């Protein structure tokens, strides 16, 4: 078996992996990126619509263009890329980690590395995870799979479809199906408000008169061999009103019902997972509970904007380089999600360093306030114009901002939204 | 269609038919295996729980008990020959009240009467020592070390593969709609117009055994479908037990079980709900709560968060509560093998022997085939190979190094093998290789599998289906449909 | 005449209003930046959208080439643009930003490749 030695192995060659790898490489360390598709770019390769890079590049690019800008940077760096390779196993003990990769070109290879970065993204929730009852006909696709089939293979998964989920993925696919000539008969959303950006409601639904059914769920799926129709049930106060259900004739169902960070490998080696994010618990340096193993991007928590993935992953790369430089990490204390907060990443902060956080709220509100407290003392208060669970909030805490550290207290940083 | 006359035509290529076919393939006979779906094991056998039962659920007066115990013993050798996933993990039946312990006693007596080896009654601490994840409220139970689990579809596929290797001819998409009898043979007609001649017929058609019996003017009886829904939990679920855990059974069914599958997932179920339709395999939302509370009563750490998916199957229930395996008294040269519900899978190796003996009794001449080979090639599976062994395998075929299904670590070589064995639908490939069965349920690998099917079979994308018939996947390419999205806006 | 709408020029999604007596005299309110005024006027005069799509290409590893218009295209011209795009077959190599269709129906907008494909 071939053996390779690197300072860092990055698992995943998408936006997160590339950004992290570039930062580690810039600091002079040897980096390998392993990617299981036949090219780098990750999920961006199938996101052919525009809207990417408004923050990072100050232009609105398509997904593939955003990815290619990074691919070009990786190509002109010393980063070694292994494509068509799947990571099969990780063996970590002491300082060196052994990571096994498999590809047709190389066979089974063993990477002996000092640090590992999980940047392998997320997977979609599907019919099984939401337990939609009814028959099991063909024609039920997750939105991501449908997107791949349309944008990368040129297939049309159905002529008359219904989209479940009004997050951006569902809305984008509603438009994409319409633009390839299919008829999208409805978008069904369980919440009383749409989950995606308003601009997408306009240009993906309103433009085509596609009805959006808020506070509705899919009941039974009908059809013996192929989808023939679905039942749609309205909710009142969250309770299904079955007697008011109606039927929509369709030949395909696209499920855009949520994303889950893909942490199978991390769990296998005993890394603790945060049940609120489904991603690893990480310290301020984005390092997991296992020494020298880091995580960034969608595998850490599901992002909305690739620009934030790039920011987080670049920062992760710098922390990996600090670790390899044997820099002493500053003292850290826990963070905790307080009122109306679903989660806060990372799970630790450092009073003496600069800190950047990403969080998601549980509520929809206009004119809300983010309040940070340590040991009961208010550290920061930030006005937020409009918040909703599907829009990630970020904020920074400069060094010295927390000045009430006490030796005999927990010093937990609590974030709340009111 | 060929003009030759078969000696035996077996109707139904589920686990029963496949097993009988393989048994008969060891003799110098011309055997036809007829299956109405596009692939084998797509009927009742598709949703089997995969349990090799312990021989204590039914009294010794039942044919099914005798065959269950005999069949159970034959699985070690079968696994050696056919390489399907099998683990003799043992079964425990947990009792939570003194009342339930009385039923346990009854089960123990059944087991003893059925001559089951190793069966024991357990007190509370023995139960908890055997299965630490049990609810500590357990008061006692039964332990049957001979019980186990298999992957049922792999089992059926391997039986069929072995049968075909030894000369059996398989006819898929052959739905029997009528039959004639002339002097020396039956003429059996399929829905598509094809026809087969055969001297004997074995009716192992599961849910439709009653209808097939009618077509052949044999006995009248009724098969009532009883739906069973199962829930699959993630491989990482902390609730996975060491043994198959049964509750104390009631008069209708064996109850909701906690099943540690061979492949590492955990299964809960099956439910038992009678219905009219023989085709309705839809799931319902009502059962979820009931199944989980039953399962949690036994193993409290079970969590709904771990659900990957659910699926249903239909049991072919015959009144009388026993197997109906006999020479027909109404139609000559016709063997009935009907009502094979639990413990059918366990009994199947013994059923095959029993049917062979019935055929012999009915006049079929059996001479052993000297070229009979009970073994089939073992297909390596990348997921379970240690890195050094995987490395060697890749040198023999690099397609083992291309991982297509990353959730279950299924390589391209395994998918190609499935296709070359005749499994050209998404479901057929799923059951053969486990690709699409993992946590992403095909989200990442479906398009790759479609490409492999196209490459290996030459089928166009419109011809690829989920499970045959009208379960088409993709009908159009971009450019086939005219775009009229803005509907003439300004 | 008045029309309420949501500006889609950027992810903010400001709620804006366009009022007009004649097409040459449209007033937009509620916007937070200049783009809102442009968007508001254009939605009345000539609503436009940026179009993204994919094209057939004879690459050995990439199934479809992603493309994008360099600016928003009038809605009324989008269907015919898409139907036209779907008939094209491209040859490699293609470099990101290569022009696939120049000056779409006299709009001054081009259709460009958003990815490079060499093989």
Image (tube, coloured by chain):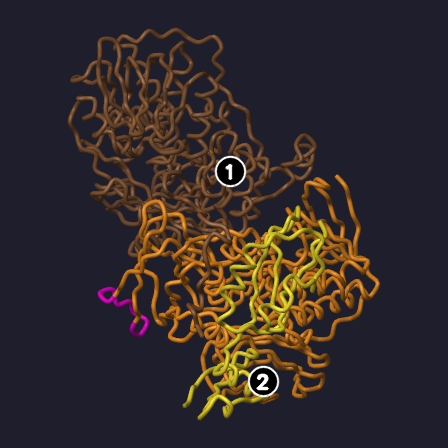
Q: Does the magenta-highlighted stretch encompass residue A241? A: yes
Between marks 2 and 1 in the image, the one whose residue lies nearer the viewer:
2
Q: Kindly tell me whether residue A149 is visible in this rendering.
A: yes
> In the image, is B143 to the left or to the right of B249?
right
The residue stretch that appears in magenta? A236-244
x and y, in percent, of residue C109 in the image: 62, 71
Which residue is label 1 attached to?
B433
Quote the CA–CA distance across marks 2 and 1.
55 Å
Single out the residue that lies furthest toward the right: A28
Tint of chain B: brown
B11 left or right, relative to C9: left
> Outermost residue toward the front?
C106
* Image quadrant where residue A328 sits: bottom right
The chain in yellow: C
| Left or right: residue B274 compared with residue A82 | left
The residue labelled by disc 2 is C35
Q: Which mark is residue B279?
A: none
Quarter of the image for the N terminus of chain B: give it: top left
The quarter of the picture where residue B53 lies is: top left
Up-down: is C49 above or below A417? Answer: above
Q: Tag 1, which chain?
A: B
Q: Which chain is orange?
A: A
Q: Is residue B284 magenta?
A: no
Residue plotted at (77% across, 54% down) = A80
Q: From the top left corner, tell me how far across and down residue B417 is, in percent.
A: 54, 32
Residue C51 position (above or below residue B324): below
Residue B208: where, in percent of width, then height? 25, 32
């Amino acid at each position: 078996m071939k053996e390779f030695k690197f300072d860092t192995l990055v698992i995943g060659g998408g936006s997160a992996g590339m950004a992290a790898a570039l930062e580690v490489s810039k600091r002079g360390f040897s980096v390998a990126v392993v990617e299981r598709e036949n090219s780098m770019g990750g999920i961006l390769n199938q996101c052919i619509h525009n809207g990417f890079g408004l923050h990072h590049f100050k232009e609105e690019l398509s997904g593939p263009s955003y990815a290619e800008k990074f691919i070009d940077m990786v190509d002109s760096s010393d980063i070694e890329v292994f494509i068509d390779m799947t990571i099969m196993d990780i063996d970590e003990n002491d300082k060196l980690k052994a990571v096994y990769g498999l590809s047709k070109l190389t066979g089974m290879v063993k990477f002996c590395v000092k640090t590992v970065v999980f940047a392998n993204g997320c997977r979609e929730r599907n019919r099984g995870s939401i337990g939609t009852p009814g028959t099991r006909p063909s024609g039920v696709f997750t939105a991501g799979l449908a997107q791949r089939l349309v944008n990368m293979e040129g297939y049309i998964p159905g002529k008359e479809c219904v989209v479940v989920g009004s997050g951006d993925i569902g809305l984008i696919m509603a438009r994409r199906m319409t633009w390839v000539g299919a008829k999208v008969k409805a978008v069904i959303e369980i919440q009383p408000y749409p989950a995606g950006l308003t601009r997408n409601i306009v240009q993906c639904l309103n433009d085509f008169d596609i009805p959006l059914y808020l506070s509705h769920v899919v009941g039974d799926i009908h059809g013996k061999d192929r989808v023939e129709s679905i039942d749609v049930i309205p909710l009142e106060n969250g309770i299904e009103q079955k007697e008011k259900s109606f039927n929509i004739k369709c030949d395909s169902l696209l499920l855009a019902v949520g994303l889950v960070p893909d942490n199978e490998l991390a769990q296998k080696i005993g890394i603790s997972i945060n049940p609120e994010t489904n991603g690893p618990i990480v310290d301020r340096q984005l390092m997991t509970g296992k020494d020298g193993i880091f995580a960034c991007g969608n595998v850490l928590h599901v992002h909305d904007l690739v620009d934030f993935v790039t920011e987080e992953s670049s920062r992760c790369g710098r922390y990996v380089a600090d670790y390899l430089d044997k820099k002493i990490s500053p003292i850290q204390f826990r963070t905790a999600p307080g009122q109306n907060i679903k989660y806060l990443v990372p799970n630790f902060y450092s009073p003496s360093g600069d800190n950047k956080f990403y969080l998601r709220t549980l509520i929809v509100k206009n004119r809300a306030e983010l309040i940070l407290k340590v040991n009961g003392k208010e550290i920061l208060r930030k006005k937020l114009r409009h918040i909703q669970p599907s829009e990630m909030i970020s904020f920074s805490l400069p060094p010295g901002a927390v000045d009430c550290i006490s030796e005999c207290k927990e010093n937990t940083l609590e974030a709340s939204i009111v | 269609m060929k003009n030759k006359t078969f000696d035996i035509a077996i109707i139904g290529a589920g686990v029963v038919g496949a097993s009988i076919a393989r048994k008969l393939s060891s003799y110098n006979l011309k055997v036809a295996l007829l299956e109405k779906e596009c692939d084998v094991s797509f009927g009742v056998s598709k949703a089997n729980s995969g349990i090799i039962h312990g021989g204590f659920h039914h009294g010794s007066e039942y044919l099914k008990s005798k065959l269950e115990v005999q069949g159970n013993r034959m699985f070690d050798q079968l696994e050696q020959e056919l390489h399907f996933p099998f683990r003799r993990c043992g079964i425990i039946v947990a009792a939570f009240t003194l009342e339930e312990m009385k039923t346990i006693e009854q089960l123990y007596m059944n087991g003893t009467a059925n001559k089951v080896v190793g069966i024991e009654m357990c007190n509370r601490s023995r139960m908890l020592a055997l299965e630490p994840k049990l609810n500590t409220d357990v008061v006692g139970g039964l332990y049957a070390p001979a019980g186990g689990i298999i992957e049922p579809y792999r089992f059926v596929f391997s039986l069929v593969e072995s049968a075909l290797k030894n000369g059996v001819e398989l006819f898929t998409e052959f739905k029997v709609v009528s039959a004639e009898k002339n002097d020396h043979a039956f003429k059996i007609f399929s829905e598509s117009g094809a026809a087969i001649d055969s001297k004997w017929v074995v009716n192992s058609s599961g849910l439709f055994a009653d209808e097939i019996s009618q077509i052949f003017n044999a006995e009248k009886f009724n098969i009532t479908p009883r739906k069973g829904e199962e829930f699959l939990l993630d491989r990482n679920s902390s609730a996975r037990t060491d043994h198959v855990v049964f509750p104390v059974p009631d008069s209708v069914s064996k109850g909701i079980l906690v099943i540690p599958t061979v492949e590492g997932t955990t299964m809960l179920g099956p439910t038992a709900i009678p219905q009219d339709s023989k085709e309705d395999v839809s799931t319902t939302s009502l059962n979820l709560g009931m199944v989980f509370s039953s399962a949690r009563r036994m193993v409290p750490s079970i969590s709904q968060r771990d659900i990957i998916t659910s699926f249903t199957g239909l049991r072919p229930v015959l009144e009388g509560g026993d197997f109906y395996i006999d020479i027909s008294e109404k139609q000559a040269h016709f063997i009935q093998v009907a009502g094979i519900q639990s413990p059918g899978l366990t009994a199947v190796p013994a059923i095959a022997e029993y049917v062979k003996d019935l055929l012999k009794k009915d006049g079929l001449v059996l001479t052993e085939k000297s070229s009979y080979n009970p073994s089939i090639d073992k297909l390596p599976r990348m997921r379970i190979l240690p890195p050094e062994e995987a490395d060697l395998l890749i040198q023999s075929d690099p397609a083992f190094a291309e991982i297509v299904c990353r959730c279950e670590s299924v390589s391209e070589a395994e998918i190609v093998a499935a296709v070359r064995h005749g499994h050209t639908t998404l479901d057929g490939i799923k059951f053969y290789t486990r690709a699409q069965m993992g946590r992403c349920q095909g989200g990442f690998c479906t398009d790759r599998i479609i490409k492999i099917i196209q490459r290996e079979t030459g089928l166009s994308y419109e011809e690829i289906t989920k499970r045959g018939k009208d379960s088409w996947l993709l009908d159009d390419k971009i450019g086939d449909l005219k775009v009229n999205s803005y509907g003439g806006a300004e | 005449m008045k029309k309420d709408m949501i500006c889609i020029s950027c992810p903010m999604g400001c709620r804006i209003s366009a009022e007009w007596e004649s097409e040459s005299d449209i007033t937009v309110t509620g916007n937070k930046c200049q783009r809102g005024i442009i968007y508001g006027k254009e939605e009345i005069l000539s609503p436009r959208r940026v179009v993204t799509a994919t094209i057939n290409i004879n690459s050995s590893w990439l199934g479809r080439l992603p493309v994008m218009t360099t600016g928003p295209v009038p809605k009324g011209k989008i269907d015919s643009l898409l139907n036209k795009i779907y008939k094209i077959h491209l040859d490699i190599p293609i470099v990101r930003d290569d022009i696939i269709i120049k000056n779409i129906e006299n709009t001054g907008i081009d259709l460009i490749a958003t990815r490079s494909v060499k093989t």
